[in-house]
């Protein structure tokens, strides 16, 4: 098997070729990416996986409900080195064993068939969704190796759009969000751990996740306090810059509990 990405003019456009042919070509490019990954060529592997994704029909997200915001932006990736369903924070063992077989919980395929100009059966649609999810997760593993954890989170989120129960993608996303160490990222870690608790069966792995959740709680609270304090400091600075035009500052305004669950503001000189 060649270790370099496959280039075929017939597949220069994602709209060319029938689904079976495109699946075959995408799988070949995925295999080339796996070869690169095994040789620690992370960037080359990432390019090969993205090349495979570009061949496949794009996922069409359902229209957002009126008045409701989507929780995640489009994102898709997976099936690169990852050791099995380990729940370790970093995909260390998870990254060094390639996963050539498709995973079991692929989501339903949802593509714009008119836009693609192709007919897709139910089985082919599921195969496309499954492969696309695996490729996105593999891209996430490449970003982890490159130390690009924000991009890893995005790639794994894309993988989970096609397969919400993809354990490796959930683990990898949680690990990268943990490293980002912000209030929002740690909240996302907590959410992913709770989902993993509902998916993972072995008692030992459940206990490990529960332990991580307990350790996560004080970090999450600390991040919340830190970022809230930073935000208030910025607002205070903005207020001082505006009030300074009138010879005042935010220190001239004191907020005190009013005994009714609220605060009263007093002006002081």
Image (tube, rainbow, N blue to C red):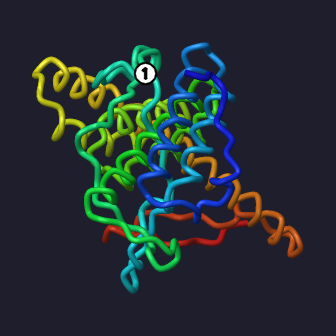
Residue beneath the point at 70% across and 65% down: 252
Left or right of 255 in this view: 20: left
**Above or below for 69 versus 154:** below
In the visual, does 195 lie left or right of 257? Answer: left
Of the pair 268 and 247, the residue shown nearer to us: 247
Instruction: Identify the residue position indicated by label 1 in the image.
Output: 98
Local packing at callout 1 (Cα closer than 10 Å; few below 14, some 14-19, many 20+) is some
Total numbered labels: 1
Q: Position of residue 5 (x, y in %)?
A: 65, 33
**Image height of 123 relative to 99, above or below:** below
Which sits in the foreground, 81 or 197? 81
Nearest the eye: 260 or 68: 68
Q: Where, by quadrant of the figure, is residue 62 drawn? A: bottom left
Q: Position of residue 51 (x, y in %)?
A: 62, 44
Q: Is residue 49 left or right of residue 69?
A: right
Residue at image position (62%, 36%) is 48
Q: Measured from the top left, where is residue 191 in percent x and y?
A: 32, 45
Q: Secondary structure at mark 1?
A: loop
Quarter of the rendering containing residue 131: top left
The residue lying at 45 percent from left, 23 percent from top is 81
Q: Residue furthest bottom?
A: 66
Relative to 215, does residue 244 appear above or below in the rendering?
A: below
Which quadrant would the C terminus be assigned to in this image? Answer: bottom right
Can the viewer see residue 84?
yes
């Amino acid at each position: 098997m060649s270790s370099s990405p496959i280039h075929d003019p017939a597949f220069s456009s994602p709209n060319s070729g029938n689904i079976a042919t495109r699946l075959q070509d995408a799988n070949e490019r995925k295999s080339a990416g796996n070869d690169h990954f095994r040789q620690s060529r992370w960037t080359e592997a990432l390019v090969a996986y993205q090349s495979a994704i570009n061949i496949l029909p794009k996922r069409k997200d359902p229209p957002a409900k009126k008045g409701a915001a989507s929780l995640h932006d489009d994102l898709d990736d997976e099936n690169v080195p990852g050791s099995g369903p380990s729940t370790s924070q970093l995909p260390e063992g998870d990254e060094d064993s390639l996963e050539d077989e498709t995973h079991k919980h692929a989501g339903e395929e949802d593509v714009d068939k008119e836009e693609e100009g192709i007919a897709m059966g139910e089985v082919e649609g599921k195969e496309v969704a499954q492969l696309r999810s695996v490729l996105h997760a593999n891209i996430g593993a490449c970003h982890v190796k490159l130390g690009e954890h924000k991009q890893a989170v995005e790639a794994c989120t894309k993988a989970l759009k096609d397969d919400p129960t993809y354990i490796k993608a959930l683990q990898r996303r949680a690990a990268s969000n943990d490293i980002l160490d912000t209030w929002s990222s740690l909240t996302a870690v907590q959410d992913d751990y709770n989902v993993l608790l509902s998916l993972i069966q072995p008692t030992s792995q459940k206990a490990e996740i529960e332990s991580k959740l307990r350790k996560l709680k004080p970090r999450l609270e600390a991040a919340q306090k830190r970022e809230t304090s930073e935000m208030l400091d910025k607002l205070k600075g903005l207020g001082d810059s505006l009030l300074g035009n009138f010879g005042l500052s935010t220190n001239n305004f004191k907020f005190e509990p009013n005994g009714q669950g609220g605060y009263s503001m007093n002006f002081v000189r």
